[in-house]
Image (cartoon, rainbow, N blue to C red):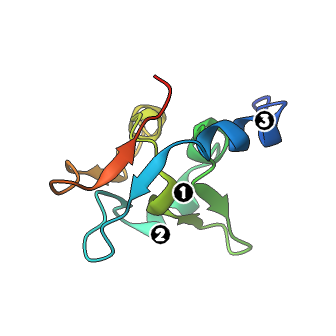
């Protein structure tokens, strides 16, 4: 099993992400895992290691928990889930999503 090098300064990244404003739509997720059972077939689960906002977490049963509230809308998870294409996405509803503070 190949382990991808994780972000070395996770606390520094979290401090930078905390500068952004998130207007979360509690009634409609703009991004989601389509079929959580599909994650059981994925050996690499690259979404966990590649998400810069750490929105993906492994569960003991092999599935992946996704929390869209901290999503930075970069699309990395959709790119790395190219084998199963198991990440659904739509534009956030008007006025919702991330608001970057410093670029």
Which is in the foreground here, disc 1 or disc 3?
3
Whether the residues at callouts 1 and 2 have beta carbons within 8 Å, the answer is yes
Q: Residue furthest right?
A: 8
The picture quadrant where one finds residue 100 is top left
Question: What x and y, as percent, mark residue 102?
Answer: 50, 26
Q: For residue 49, which numbered disc appears in the image?
A: none
Q: What residue lies at 46% left-to-right and 61% top-to-bottom?
A: 69
The residue beneath circle 3 is: 12
The residue beneath circle 2 is: 37
Q: What residue lies at 65% left-to-right and 36% top-to-bottom?
A: 16
Q: Quadrant of the N terminus?
A: top right
The residue beneath circle 1 is: 41
Q: Examine the rendering and report whether any part of residue 1 can be seen.
A: no
Mark-to-mark CA distance, 1 and 3: 33 Å
Which is in the foreground here, disc 3 or disc 2?
3
Q: Residues within 10 Å of mark 2 (few under 14, many from 20)?
A: few
67 vs 92: above or below: below
Q: Examine the rendering and report whether any part of residue 25 can be seen.
A: yes
Question: What x and y, as percent, mark residue 103?
Answer: 46, 22
Mark-to-mark CA distance, 1 and 2: 8 Å
Is 41 or 6 nearer to us in this picture?
Answer: 6
Question: What x and y, as percent, mark residue 68?
Answer: 44, 60
């Amino acid at each position: 099993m190949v382990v991808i090098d994780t972000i070395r300064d996770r606390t520094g990244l979290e401090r930078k992400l905390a500068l952004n404003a998130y207007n979360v739509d509690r009634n409609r997720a703009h991004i989601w895992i389509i079929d959580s059972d599909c994650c059981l077939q994925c050996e690499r689960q690259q979404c966990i290691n590649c998400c810069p906002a750490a929105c993906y977490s492994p569960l003991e049963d092999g599935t992946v928990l996704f929390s869209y509230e901290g999503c930075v809308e970069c699309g990395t998870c959709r790119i790395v889930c190219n084998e199963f294409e198991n990440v659904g996405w739509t534009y956030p509803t008007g006025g919702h999503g991330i608001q970057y503070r410093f670029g």
